[in-house]
């Protein structure tokens, strides 16, 4: 389980790096090809192309960084679940949004990819 948690933490760190680099394509590549993203207040976003458009929108809205902090990870057969907290930043270190998230990860081409991603603002 420690190996899986380390793999998830590395992907989460990469998420923050790509967000700071404003790299929507790289961010969407962290997601499975058949991803389902459930942002707060919005419709379900299906597929990597739609996910990239969502990331472009987040960047266009002023997001300049993000941090993901894992609280729990659990095995579930072919998939892994992760629960944690997030912060999105604007203009360096100003908080744009923060809250909690739940991700289901799955393996695609040997790598863990975000498969289902849902987050909610607030604590």
Image (cartoon, helix red, strand yellow):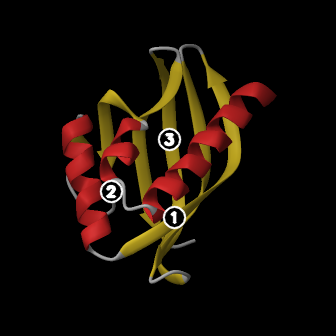
Q: As displayed, is residue 19 above or below residue 27?
A: below
Q: Report which quarter residue 37 is drawn in.
A: top left
Q: Residue 90, percent across and down?
A: 44, 80
Give the residue at mark 3.
Answer: 103
Q: What is the quadrant of the C terminus in the image?
A: bottom right
Residue at 70% x, 43% y: name it: 72
| In this rendering, position of residue 111 left or right of residue 115 | right
In terms of image quadrants, where is residue 32? Answer: top left
> Which residue, given by chain and number where applicable, does mark 2 sit on?
39
Residue at the far front in the pictured view: 21
Between 52 and 17, the one nearer to me in the picture: 17
Using the numbered discs, state the Cα–Cα distance from disc 1 to disc 3 in whole angstroms: 16 Å
Whichever of callouts 3 and 2 sits on the residue coming sooner in the sequence is: 2
Q: Between tags 1 and 3, which lies in front?
A: 1
Disc 2 crowd rating (10 Å Cα; few below 14, some 14-19, many 20+) is some
Q: Secondary structure at mark 2?
A: loop
Q: Are marks 1 and 3 in contact (CB under 8 Å)?
A: no
User: Residue 31 appears in which quarter of the rendering?
Assistant: top left
Q: Say if 122 sits above or below 74 in the image.
A: below
Residue at (67% x, 50% y) in the render: 70
Q: CA distance from mark 3 to mark 2?
A: 12 Å
Q: Residue at x 63, y 37 (%)?
A: 8
The N terminus is located in which quarter? top right
Is 90 on the left or on the right of 5, as rendered? left
The residues tagged by marks 1 and 2 sit, at their Cα atoms, a distance apart of 15 Å
Residue 1 visible in rendering: no
Q: Residue furthest right?
A: 2
């Amino acid at each position: 389980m420690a190996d899986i948690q380390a793999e998830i933490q590395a992907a989460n760190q990469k998420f923050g790096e790509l967000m700071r680099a404003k790299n929507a394509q790289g961010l969407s590549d962290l997601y499975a090809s058949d991803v389902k993203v459930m942002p707060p207040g919005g419709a379900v976003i299906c597929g990597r192309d739609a996910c990239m458009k969502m990331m472009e929108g987040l960047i266009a809205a002023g997001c300049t960084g993000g941090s993901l902090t894992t609280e729990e990870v659990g095995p579930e057969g072919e998939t892994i679940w992760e629960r944690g907290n997030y912060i999105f930043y604007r203009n360096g270190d100003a908080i744009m949004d923060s809250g909690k998230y739940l991700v289901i990860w799955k393996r695609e081409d040997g790598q863990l990819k975000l498969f289902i991603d849902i987050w909610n603002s607030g604590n």
